[in-house]
Image: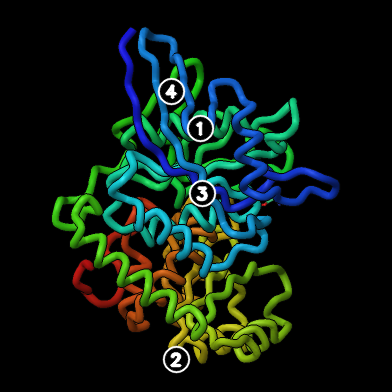
């Protein structure tokens, strides 16, 4: 029997996977470690698997954790940066990374990590579960073991979200069920891999590894990414990014003004989850409020609240008002990806125009711009 082995880093941030009690709350990392050691195939530092070929796979793991593991509904952009930094600091020492995370805001974190970890050349697999690992009838063990195997052996140079039977691109995934084991979907991009008896990676759907000069394999590039994380962390207390789901009747309220004027720190980005292909009411006072915000420097993204498909601002006259007010198309980005991308780009200190251009450009496989070249400046790829 041939043997293969790999080293992976597992970061436990909290979430149902590590919860117990009633109502559920995250257990401390030391207890999760002890629980893990009672699971088949695990000891204190190794997971041994015998996939259905003649190899033995030994995954040497280190379990690290947030000082206080949290329910993911308490996650903030600061936590996204902290997770990215933990991975970056250990990048050279491991073959892959697993993040254990609550399902509620997992899609924001996986989107944010995709942007923050620019030049990633190893797998970062985020997973969690609907039922705690501590319970007998649970999806946690399967999700965890498969995520560890993907991190150890797949080589996928992306932030992925593994859940149930599928590995999704992190910046394409969305939570779609509060109770089904199939808790996530990727409505606008097929899964990168599916896990049945074997784990099958769809290589043609996976992003190519980054060019060597901008790859995290190089210490110089890692230093650049670390400096960017630092800059973003410094900038976070100085701006807000809001998300607003449009609804029939919004034009007769002053919701937009109140939201934009009363929010502290000041709003620099707004993700509109508009109707259909990016449509909105054309009431002058509503559009005027948006135009004023845009003139004050707010980046406004015309996204859709519809789960599948893309914004197409040319399809209906009712999208043209938003465009004239200064909104840019969110194409087929999920609201989670759009929000995380705005936080990332604004955190880098880019100008309104630069952010508008990059929001419409595919940076990590998060969007497909179907309607020709992007509006606005030609901006040097960074
Ligand atoms: N409230 C939990 C969390 O997001 C839900 C879960 O993990 O499934 O942390």
Q: Residue 203's spot in the image, x, y percent?
A: 30, 31
User: Measuring 43% from the left and 88% from the top, which residue is drawn there?
Assistant: 297
- In the rendered view, would you say 377 is above or below 266? above
Q: For this view, does 186 lie left or right of residue 158?
A: right
| Mark whose residue sits in front, 2 or 4 | 4
The label on residue 295 is 2
Q: Report the Cα–Cα distance between label 1 and label 2.
A: 43 Å
Secondary structure at numbered mark 2: helix
Which residue is under mark 4? 199
Of labels 4 and 3, earlier in sequence is 3
Kindly check if marks 1 and 2 are in contact, taking CB atoms under 8 A apart as contact: no
Q: Report the Cα–Cα distance between label 2 and label 3.
A: 45 Å
Of labels 2 and 3, earlier in sequence is 3
Of labels 1 and 2, earlier in sequence is 1
Which residue is under mark 3? 64
Viewer-proximal residue among 113 and 93: 93
Secondary structure at numbered mark 4: strand
- In the rendered view, would you say 46 is above or below 285? above
Secondary structure at numbered mark 3: strand
Which residue is under mark 1? 166
């Amino acid at each position: 029997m041939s043997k293969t082995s790999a080293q992976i880093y597992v970061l436990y941030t909290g979430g149902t996977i590590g919860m117990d009690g009633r109502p559920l709350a995250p257990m401390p990392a030391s207890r999760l470690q002890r629980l893990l050691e009672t699971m088949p195939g695990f000891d204190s530092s190794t997971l041994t698997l015998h996939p259905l070929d003649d190899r033995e796979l030994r995954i040497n793991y280190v379990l690290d954790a947030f000082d206080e593991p949290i329910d993911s509904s308490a996650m903030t952009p600061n936590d996204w940066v902290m997770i990215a930094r933990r991975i970056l600091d250990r990048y050279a020492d491991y073959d892959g990374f697993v993040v254990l995370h609550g399902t509620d805001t997992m899609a924001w974190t996986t989107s944010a990590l995709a942007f923050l970890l620019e030049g990633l050349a190893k797998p970062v697999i985020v997973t969690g579960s609907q039922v705690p690992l501590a319970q007998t009838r649970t999806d946690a063990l399967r999700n965890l073991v498969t995520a560890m195997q993907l991190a150890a052996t797949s080589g996928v140079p992306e932030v992925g979200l593994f859940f149930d039977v599928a590995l999704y691109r992190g910046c394409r995934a969305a939570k779609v069920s509060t109770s089904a084991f199939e808790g996530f979907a990727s409505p606008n991009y097929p899964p990168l891999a599916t896990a049945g008896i074997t784990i099958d990676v769809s290589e043609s759907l996976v992003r190519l590894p980054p060019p060597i000069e901008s790859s995290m394999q190089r210490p110089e590039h890692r230093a650049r990414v670390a400096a960017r994380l630092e800059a973003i962390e410094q900038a976070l207390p100085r701006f807000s990014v809001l998300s607003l789901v449009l609804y029939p009747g919004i034009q007769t309220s002053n919701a937009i003004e109140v939201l934009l004027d009363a929010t502290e720190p000041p709003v620099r980005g707004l993700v509109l989850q508009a109707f259909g292909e990016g449509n909105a009411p054309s009431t002058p006072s509503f559009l005027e409020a948006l135009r004023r915000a845009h003139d004050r420097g707010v980046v406004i993204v015309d996204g859709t609240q519809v789960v599948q498909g893309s914004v197409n601002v040319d399809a209906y006259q009712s999208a043209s008002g938003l465009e004239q007010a200064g909104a840019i198309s969110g194409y087929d980005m999920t609201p989670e990806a759009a929000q995380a991308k705005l936080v990332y780009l604004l955190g880098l200190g880019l100008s309104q125009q630069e952010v508008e251009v990059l929001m419409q450009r595919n940076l990590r496989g998060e969007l497909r711009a179907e309607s020709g070249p992007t509006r606005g400046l030609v901006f040097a790829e960074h």
